[in-house]
C-alpha cells in the first residue's frame, strides 16, 4: 500500500481532531437553517436511503447554490452524450441541495461527506461513480486520493483560481500540489486561471471558458418576471442582487445622505437566506416601508423596498429590473455572478471587489456591458444618471446581451473534456 505523504497525514490528523465538533456545527447552523439538521449521516459517508440502480453513475459535485445553477448547461450536454448514465449531484450547503432537488428531480441528490479518508471511501463504495466532475475550485485532498485509489477519473470543471487563493494553496506545499495533480483533466475558465493551476501542480489543463455564459433564462423565469412587474407597478426598479453582509448598510447609509427619487422601487435579494430577516429589520429600522416576496402582495405606492426572500428566482428578478447592482462587490468578497445579469439584458453596476469574476468583469467593462462604481455613493449617482438616460440604459443592456452571447460554448468544450477523461479511463481499465 502506498504511504500517505507527510502533509496529508497532518491534514488527516487535524480533520479527526475537529471531527467531534462537526455535529455541533451542524446543530448551530440548523438553528437558523433547519435543513442543516437533515441528512446528517450523509456527511459522514452513510447513504443507505439512496440506492443506485444498475446504470453507471455520472457524479457532479456542486458545493452550493451558484455552482449548482452553473452546472445546468454542462449537465444538459453530458446527458445528451451519456444517455445511459444515472446522474448523482452532491452538495455541501443546504441551499445547494435544495436547488439540486429542484433543477434535477430525476437525479440522486446527496451531501458530499466531510473530507475524511474513511468517509470518502464509504461514499465511493456506495455509489461507485464512473467519473466525477467537481465544479469550480473544490479541492479535497482525501477525496481526490480516494478517487485515484479506486481508479475513478476526476475532472475539475469551470475551474477558477484567484491570485489570493493560489497564494493560500502554495502555503500548504505538497498537500495542495498532490491534490491538484490528482485531477485527470482540468477545464479552466481563463488563461490566468490555467497558469495558476499549473503552478500548483495541475496537469492536463485546457482553457474552456466560463460555463455560466451558457446558462439561459428559463421561460418560467420570464413569466415570473412579468408577474413581478405586475406587483411592482409602474415605477422603475433597481435590483440589489445577491448582496452580502455589510453591503445593505453601506447602501442604506448612502440613501440617507442622498435619497433616491420616489418613483424608484428598490428590490433587495440577499445572497444567503439566513440573512433575510436581518436585512428586512435593517431596512425597516431606517424608516423604509417594506414588503416581502414571500407575501406575494402588490407593492403599494408608499412602499420603497421589496425583499426578495426566495431562492432560485434570480433570473426573474434580473428580468424584472431596469437597473441591476451585482452584490458582493462593495465588500471584499470578490463579487457574485455578473454574467447572469448581463445575459438578462439589463444595465449592470458592480463595485470594486471582483476577483471571483476578474476576467469576466474586465471583458464586460471593455465591451460596454458593465459600469464599475467605487462605492455606495457612486452607485446611487450612477443609478440617478441612468434613470434619466433611457437610451444609455438600452445601449448598456444591448452590450450586455452581446457580451454574454459572444462567450458561450464553454459547456460543450467542458463536456468534451469529461468524455475524453471517461474514455481514457476505460482504455486504461482494459
Image (spheres, rainbow, N blue to C red):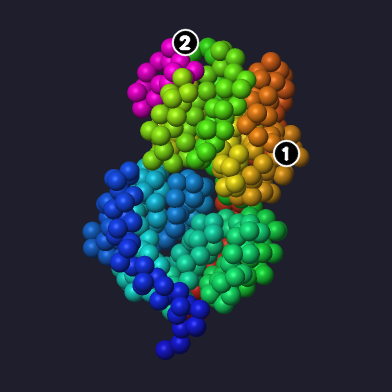
Q: Is residue 297 magenta?
A: yes
The local secondary structure at tag 2 comes to loop
Whether residue 338 is visible here, answered yes or no, is no
Neighbourhood count class around disc 1 (C-alpha, 10 Å): few under 14, some 14–19, many 20 upward:
some
- Residue 365, placed above or below residue 256: below
Whether residue 243 is visible here, answered yes or no, is yes
The part of the chain drawn in magenta is 288-304
Neighbourhood count class around disc 2 (C-alpha, 10 Å): few under 14, some 14–19, many 20 upward:
some
- Residue 15, placed above or below residue 234: below
The local secondary structure at tag 1 comes to helix
At x 62%, y 31%, the residue is 376
**Disc sitting over residue 218 in the figure:** none
| Of 273 and 406, the residue lying toward us | 273
**Disc sitting over residue 301 in the figure:** 2
* Quarter of the rendering containing residue 12: bottom left
Give the main secondary structure, helix, strand or loop, of the magenta stretch.
loop
**Disc sitting over residue 365 in the figure:** 1
Amino acid at each position: 500500500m502506498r504511504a500517505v505523504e507527510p502533509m496529508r497525514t497532518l491534514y488527516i490528523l487535524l480533520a479527526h481532531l475537529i471531527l467531534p465538533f462537526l455535529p455541533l456545527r451542524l446543530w448551530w447552523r440548523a438553528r437558523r437553517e433547519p435543513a442543516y439538521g437533515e441528512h446528517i449521516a450523509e456527511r459522514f459517508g452513510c447513504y443507505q436511503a439512496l440506492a443506485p440502480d444498475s446504470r453507471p453513475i455520472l457524479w457532479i459535485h456542486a458545493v452550493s447554490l451558484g455552482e449548482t445553477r452553473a452546472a445546468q448547461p454542462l449537465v444538459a450536454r453530458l446527458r445528451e452524450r451519456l444517455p445511459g448514465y444515472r446522474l448523482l449531484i452532491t452538495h455541501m450547503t443546504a441551499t445547494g441541495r435544495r436547488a439540486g432537488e429542484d433543477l434535477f428531480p430525476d437525479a440522486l441528490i446527496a451531501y458530499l461527506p466531510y473530507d475524511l479518508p474513511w468517509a470518502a471511501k464509504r461514499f465511493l463504495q456506495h455509489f461507485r461513480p464512473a467519473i466525477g466532475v467537481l465544479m469550480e475550485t473544490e479541492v479535497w485532498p482525501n477525496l481526490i486520493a480516494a478517487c485515484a485509489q479506486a481508479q475513478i477519473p476526476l475532472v475539475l470543471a469551470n475551474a477558477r483560481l484567484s491570485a489570493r487563493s493560489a497564494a493560500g494553496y502554495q502555503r500548504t506545499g505538497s498537500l495542495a500540489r498532490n491534490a491538484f495533480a490528482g485531477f485527470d483533466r482540468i477545464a479552466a475558465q481563463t488563461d490566468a486561471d490555467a497558469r495558476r493551476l499549473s503552478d500548483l501542480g495541475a496537469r492536463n489543463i485546457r482553457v474552456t471558458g466560463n460555463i455560466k455564459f451558457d446558462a439561459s433564462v428559463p421561460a418560467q423565469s420570464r413569466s415570473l418576471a412579468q408577474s413581478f412587474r405586475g406587483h411592482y407597478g409602474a415605477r422603475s426598479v433597481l435590483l440589489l442582487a445577491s448582496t452580502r453582509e455589510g453591503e445593505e448598510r453601506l447602501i442604506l447609509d448612502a440613501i440617507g445622505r442622498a435619497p433616491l427619487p420616489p418613483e424608484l422601487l428598490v428590490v433587495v435579494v440577499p445572497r444567503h437566506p439566513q440573512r433575510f430577516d436581518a436585512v428586512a429589520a435593517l431596512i425597516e429600522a431606517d424608516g423604509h416601508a417594506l414588503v416581502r416576496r414571500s407575501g406575494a402582495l402588490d407593492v403599494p405606492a408608499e412602499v420603497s423596498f421589496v425583499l426578495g426572500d426566495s431562492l432560485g428566482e434570480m433570473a426573474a428578478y434580473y428580468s424584472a429590473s431596469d437597473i441591476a447592482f451585482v452584490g458582493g462587490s462593495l465588500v471584499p468578497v470578490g463579487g457574485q455572478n455578473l454574467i447572469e445579469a448581463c445575459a438578462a439584458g439589463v444595465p449592470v453596476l458592480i463595485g470594486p471587489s471582483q476577483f471571483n469574476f476578474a476576467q469576466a468583469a474586465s471583458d464586460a467593462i471593455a465591451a460596454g456591458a458593465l459600469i464599475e462604481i467605487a462605492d455606495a455613493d457612486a452607485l446611487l449617482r450612477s443609478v440617478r444618471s441612468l434613470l434619466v438616460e433611457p437610451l444609455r440604459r438600452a445601449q448598456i443592456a444591448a452590450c450586455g446581451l452581446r457580451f454574454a452571447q459572444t462567450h458561450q460554448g464553454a459547456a460543450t468544450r467542458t463536456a468534451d473534456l469529461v468524455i475524453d477523461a471517461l474514455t481514457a479511463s476505460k482504455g486504461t481499465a482494459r
